[in-house]
DNA sequence: TATGAATGAGAATTCATTCAT
DNA sequence: GATGAATGAATTCTCATTCAT
């Protein structure tokens, strides 16, 4: 679960000041871009937020595009690192799956900037991310982890055959991401506060049911349900 | 004095030119905003795309914000109208559910601008949409339709109890929306072309399996599968 | 005291509608220009205020400049006509002078638009007014009236010699005009509400004292003049 | 981050370049605004006149309004500073009064931009000036100076009682301000060149006579007052 | 490493005016 | 007389970026 360094180092060991300034800029940029999007984000404001001179941003990161990419990389690095700390291999397959779903949901909840940044980047058709040299390798462990989990479940006869780990991960992410990222429009069109604590719990239950009922072989589903249901409101036979 | 309100007047019927100009602006704005986002969209380019004088945009729509809202409303109106054409009430519950999933997926595929616009609007925390006076009422029929469908399925013992129509709709939308809207970053991080025809078909199957296996009572799932599988490559018993 | 027609008539007698529209435009333009100045005044708003189509303004008045001139002329006509209704010739000279001062003050108070329009026009160096063909002749009666009044007073030994009617009129106007037109800045810099009822009465008394004490014969004024004349070019002993 | 406040900073002494640029902008803005008024003044032209990049104007002053206020403040500061250099306390009361009148007249003559700027600001109802934090305190010395002068004159039995220094100052300013600021329209309506050297001299004499004859004790003034005073509150013998 | 000053290109928006009927 | 639609040229203001030190 060691955090991946947000940017490559040069030969000479950088001073503490350098690190502090760079980190301040990166944090400020993350806030700014997630608040206003890429096009709406202002370099001026980032400098102000970071408490550094605007020129320094260019000195360290080159330009706005590159700064955004650095923010993206560091954000991806954070979530992937956190996932590696889940130790899914130590849990029963179904429990591991639940844990991944719950983790993902909570991570999205705790990191709205991640959702926002991804939206921005997709609005730009991944213009920046596709220039990244590090991003691909950052994700193989995730796929590997899921693949192993699915194989274990299949071997135990618990998980169905033919589940693609990437497809499954995208679904797990989808169900939470869309709900949270599009929360604003959804709340307006449905006239409901989707951010209310009850609504959030309900959503996690719903997501978990969806994914688990899909991944597991059908007949024994009920048996796999935990005795203490997380959500007491939904009584099940 | 100037006709800023996007809604049509009752007194004098607007000339054909008016309609044509407004429609051209709306279409061009839709293209522009979905291509570049709201902050990145340029009024100049919209005028150019629409082949009208820039001033006319302000004459008809007031300002960039209001124009974007008009685009959003018209886009929502389109998808909601198309949904009403599905006539889910004429189909068996499970078939109706499949049809809705398929329709939603295909609509998203055919209308990338819808995804993009929603992303943009959420980046702005629904700043524009929350000013809309028409958007709420536009969505009650959708919820109504789903509610009716779920009730029918439950009455026939096919659908499980306690499924919230809004929750279900959000999930149906999620699975396709996230996949397509975030297609660019997902393709980069997983190193896969998620837009390949095969991948798209596979995704629809996966989504359908997920939702149907969740919504239906467990034991009879296999029996409900249509004889002619949509996707011949995925062999099922 | 007959009001002077604001604009010349053409051969054919204009319809009532024409008159009404023109008058509405003129009134609206007067309000608009006095509120925002010439450069700040908007043709759009004038049309809106007048409840007529913008095009009509051009139809009747040609352009913004000419419209402003028409407003100016009609405003001057109003005050000059009102002055002719004072019948100063029926009063004792000093009383007539007081009456003129009081009238001028009250007229300015009641017609802030007059002050504002003149300020605007002077900001433009009388660009519009100097094109007027009617304005000169509108003012000879005023000068004539004052000239007669001063002559009467002199003949009775009440008024001093050598008072120039134009100079005197400008002073009478000055004392009220500046106070009222510059009321906003004066109130700010002196931290006093110059528009308070008491302040207004006090001002009129002050103005009247100033002008009357100047115009009337006074025994000691000459004695107070310094030995060295103010104007060195005027011959000294 | 950008130095929008016009006041000088204390921390780091601004470089000469900063001072030069700001002064150039201020001077150019003064010229532009006094020539065209506020609404008619163009930021583009100000930049051109000042020989600086347009962006710099916003960098230093924030926006057009704030720039105009800075011009106003600096203009007021100039005249008030010049007044303090008159040393009225070293002169006999009447002579001091004459000197103030003459100074004011000549200052207005030499600084048409002052008149023009005040007119503009009043057209806007002192919208900008009322935001100023410095303007009030700039004017107490003037009132103080006049108050002292009037007291000295009264003590010597030369000046009449009950003269309000603010009222008197407004009158002194009025007589010159109106004549010069409205010179353009007055010249047109009276068909006279009020700017001719002779006319200017004559005006100063006239103004001086008016004010001095009012301020000094005069034996016959009361006798000329009508029996029915307009203002019953001000009891007169 | 750090920064205050400066900028060219372009952003949304406005305005008086005219077209076509 | 009257009007809704349309426009070219400005106008204020913004933005990422660079200069000079």
Image: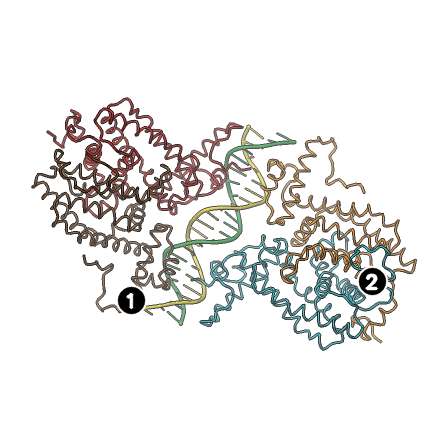
Chain colours: A brown, B red, C orange, D cyan, E yellow, F green
Query: Tag 2, which secondary structure?
Result: helix
- Circle 1 marks a residue in which chain? A
Pair 1/2: label in front: 2
Question: From what the image shows, is residue C97 above or below residue B34?
Answer: below
Q: Is residue F7 left or right of residue F18?
A: right
Q: Which residue is located at x 37 percent, y 63 percent?
A: A51
Query: Which corner quadrant holds the N terminus of chain D?
Result: bottom left
Residue sticking out furthest to the top: B90
Asked whether residue A112 appears in the rendered view, the answer is yes
Secondary structure under tag 1 reads: helix
Q: Which mark is residue C148?
A: none
Disc count in the image? 2
**Of C91 and B31, which appears nearest the observer?**
C91
Along the line of sight, the residue nearer the viewer: A27 or B220? B220
Image spot of residue D142 (x, y percent): 66, 68
Q: Position of residue C93 (x, y in %)?
A: 87, 55
Residue A18's tag is: 1
* Residue identified by numbered label 2: C213
Up the image or down, A118 lies above or below D224; here it is above
At label 1, counting other C-alpha atoms closer than 10 Å, the crowd grade (few under 14, some 14-19, many 20 or more) is few
Task: Indicate left or right for A12 with C93 as reference.
Answer: left
In the figure, residue D84 lies in which quadrant?
bottom right
Q: Is residue C44 left or right of residue B100?
A: right
The C terminus of chain D sits in image quarter:
bottom right
Circles 1 and 2 on the same chain: no
**Would residue C161 be visible to someone looking at this image?**
no
Q: What separation in Å lies between label 1 and label 2 (alpha carbons)?
A: 80 Å
Residue in the foreground of this view, choosing between C65 and C89: C89
């Amino acid at each position: 679960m060691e955090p991946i360094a947000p940017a490559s180092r040069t030969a000479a060991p950088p001073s503490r000041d350098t690190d502090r300034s760079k980190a301040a800029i990166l944090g400020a940029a993350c806030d700014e871009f997630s608040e206003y999007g890429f096009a709406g984000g202002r370099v001026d404001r980032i400098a102000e937020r970071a408490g550094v001179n605007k020129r320094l941003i260019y000195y360290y990161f080159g330009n706005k595009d590159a700064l955004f990419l650095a923010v993206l990389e560091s954000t991806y690095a954070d979530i992937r690192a956190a996932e590696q700390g889940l130790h899914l291999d130590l849990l029963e397959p179904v429990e591991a799956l639940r844990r991944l779903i719950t983790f993902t949901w909570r991570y999205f909840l705790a990191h709205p900037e991640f959702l926002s940044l991804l939206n921005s980047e997709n609005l730009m058709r991944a213009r920046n991310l596709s220039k990244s040299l590090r991003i691909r390798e950052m994700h193989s462990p995730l796929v590997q982890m899921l693949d192993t989990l699915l194989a274990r479940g299949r071997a135990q006869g618990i998980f169905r055959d033919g589940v693609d780990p990437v497809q499954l991960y995208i679904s797990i992410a989808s169900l939470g991401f869309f709900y949270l990222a599009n929360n604003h429009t959804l709340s307006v069109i449905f006239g409901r506060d989707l951010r209310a604590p009850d609504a959030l719990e309900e959503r996690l239950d719903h997501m978990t049911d969806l994914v688990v009922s899909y991944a597991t072989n059908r007949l024994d589903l009920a048996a796999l349900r935990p005795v203490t249901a997380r959500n007491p409101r939904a009584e099940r036979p």
